[in-house]
Image (cartoon, helix red, strand yellow):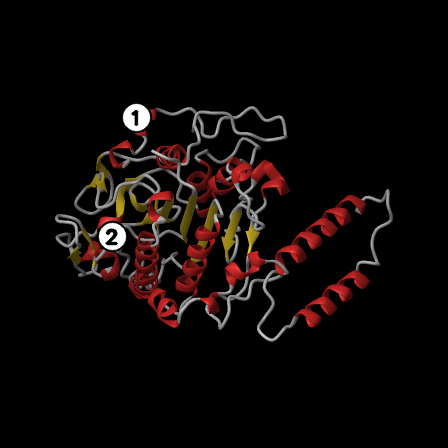
Amino acid sequence: MKPAKSVVEIWLWGGPSQLETFDPKPDAPRDYNGGLKAIPTNVPGMELHEWWPELAKCADLFSVIRTMTHRHNGHESAAYLMQTGRMPGGGEVCPAIGAVISQAKKAGYKGDLPPYVILTAAKGRFSEVGFLGAEAAPLVTGGQPNSQRFVVDGIVAPAGVNPAASNARFDMLAELDAWRPKEGSANAARAREFDVAGVEARRIAEGDAAKVFDLSLESEETRNRYGRTHVGQSLLAARRLVEYGVPYITLNHPGWDSHKRHFETMKKRSADTDMAVAAFLKDLKDRGLLDSTIVWMGGEFGRTPKVGWDPPWNGGRNHFANCFSMLVAGGGFKGGCVVGKSDETASKPVERPVSPQDFLGSIYELCGIDPDGPLANNKGKKLTVLPPQSEAGRLKEIYA
């Protein structure tokens, strides 16, 4: 099996409910399922929640894990654990999976864009590059993907800004840079780093790499198929980044922290995301890219199985890490599989619990990176990619 070339992480920032995504419980009491239903998929015996009809039509392209589990119910600690495979604390901020994979694949990557791209905002819960520092820093695009063009902050100029106007802006920036720290001062080194970053940004902005973000080059039919939404157009950009060869792409998709009025929030978020992710997976498949691209989607934890109907929750679900779901596709993962079984209310794993280390270790392995091997860095840190773990925990049953 050839290692996956790219990874696309769809991070559902805040923690999506397992019951209203990939582990519906239609036979549970209303206090658990809200009176909602499951729907069949194109894979016999596999069901999704009724709010994911487009993914249900292409379930043969992905697998779901229904028994993710850990013990951290705070956003920061849970996100850190799910991104690094390490328990928080200990005075060391370790790099997230995006930084590790992009650095491991950097030598074989020939593109002008950084090997790690985030659409369109960083998680903000912790430093995603950890002690690797600036050398592993991603391009965090900013910008508005659901516009006439994907205007990326500092890389792609808005429509109507011609080369002469762009040059004028760089000239003005150079004049402002005249007010710089003197050599030998405390901030001189930082000023030099800023200069290097500016040269790199201009090289990208004036080269072919910037065209990756120009969604006006896509047909209206394609853009509409993904959905003219932030998540839809971001995933269309992600497909273009995969085609360009970027090793690691993250879409940070917020809005899943549904303490109050949970069902209203989930229904809205699910509609946009279902349409976009289904279009993305089918597009990768049709273009021959899915076999070489890992796609994973989920958040730091799930939501409490029992609904809080009374004020102030008014039908809410709170943080819940004991049992939650993930989606994986492509890059060496089989489609159409279900890993694990939860109890009748999605409260605890009954069969095949999966830890963050098991999950991340599987992604690393399919990318050709030994999870037990050394974590390369220039800081003199003697660490392995993941903490010591049992290889038996990895998701080998859904390796292609």
Label 1 crowd (10 A; few <14 / some 14-19 / many >=20): few
**Element assignment for label 2:** loop
The amino acid at mark 1 is: Ala
**Vertical side of 327 occupied by 105: above or below:** above
Comparing 87 with 310, the one in front is: 87
Q: Position of residue 129 (x, y in %)?
A: 56, 41
The amino acid at mark 2 is: Leu
Q: Residue at x 25, y 61 (%)?
A: 54
Comparing 52 with 74, the one in front is: 52
94 sits left or right of 190 in the view: left
8 sits left or right of 396 in the view: right
Q: Residue at x 46, y 69 (%)?
A: 146
Q: Is residue 81 visible?
A: yes
Residue 19's disc is 2
Residue under pointer 1: 392
- Picture quarter with the C terminus: top left
Comparing 218 with 326, the one in front is: 218
**Element assignment for label 1:** helix
62 sits left or right of 38 in the view: right
Q: Residue at x 54, y 64 (%)?
A: 143
User: Of discs 2 and 1, which sits in the foreground?
Assistant: 1
**Vertical side of 177 occupied by 77: above or below:** above
Residue 133's disc is none
Q: Position of residue 275 (x, y in %)?
A: 31, 63
Q: Residue at x 20, y 52 (%)?
A: 24
**Vertical side of 322 occupied by 219: above or below:** below
- Is tag 2's residue or tag 1's residue first in the polypeptide sequence? 2
Tell me the CA gap for discs 2 and 1: 27 Å
Whether label 2 touches label 1, CB < 8 Å = no
